[in-house]
Image: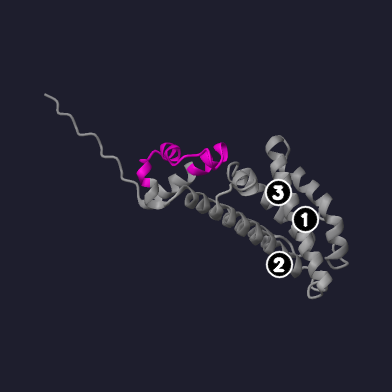
Amino acid sequence: MTTQRPAPRRRRLSAEDRRRRILQAAMAVFAQRGYHAASMAEIAADAGIAASVIYDHFPSKADLHVALLEGQAAELLQSTQAAVAAAPAGLAPRVRAGADAFFAFVERHPYAWRMLFRDPPGEPSVAACHDRIHQQATDAIVAFLKSHAPSAHGRPEGDRAIEMFAQMLKMAQHGLAVWWYEHRDTPRDELVDRLLDFCWTGLQRHLPPPTDTAPR
């Protein structure tokens, strides 16, 4: 007579594991379907958990979307700043390192960039989060440029020029990220080259020390 062994009990997910599953599923659903068409039930199904469990972690769809935006924006900023810090001294190599890190993030996270760079939904808390994230990105680029252009920083016209260059650099990157989605066979290095071809003349002329050279 043989005895059947009881089936092994499934390991109960920790709260941290459940939260991670929810965020991963939500990123894909939001990116593919958009904020308004996505549902918490669909996200729960993709995460393999009960719909009620999502509300233990996120009180609303807007709160879930905001958590995703903030987490991905923080990762993008951290990876870009780390790449810039590790690059050789000088504006030229650090501009290239920052641009490459930005597009590397887009390459690694095909869903996240769509949430970060496309028009935000009309939900007030989500739109406000978008505004904060984009302002933080601009502020980070402004701080970077000011650190490499001490002679320009501190004069009204110099500070204004730095802010304009920061905005142009940010929007050029975002525009290329959107374009890249439709032209995925384009190598990342080519995107970086074209971005710097577009931006470098103005940066070199107005911001860096005379000894700096083009970022090739």
Callout 2 amino acid: Ala
Rounded to the nearest angstrom, the CA distance separating label 1 from label 2 is 15 Å
* Residue at which label 3 appears: 174
Residue range corresponding to the magenta coloring: 26-53
Q: Earlier in the sequence, mark 1 or mark 3?
A: 1
Which residue occupies the foreground of this view, 44 or 143? Answer: 44
Callout 1 amino acid: Met
* Residue at which label 2 appears: 143
* Residue at which label 1 appears: 168
Q: Give above or below for 110 relative to 72.
A: above
* The residue positioned farthest toward the left in the image shown: 1
Secondary structure state at the residue bearing disc 2: helix
Q: Earlier in the sequence, mark 1 or mark 2?
A: 2
Crowd around label 2: few <14 · some 14–19 · many ≥20 (10 Å): some
Residue 154's x, y, as percent?
79, 75
Crowd around label 1: few <14 · some 14–19 · many ≥20 (10 Å): some
Picture residue at 75% right of the left edge, 69% below the top: 146
Instruction: Give the quadrant of residue 52.
Output: top left
Secondary structure state at the residue bearing disc 3: helix
Picture residue at 20% right of the left edge, 34% below the top: 6
Residue 15's x, y, as percent?
36, 52
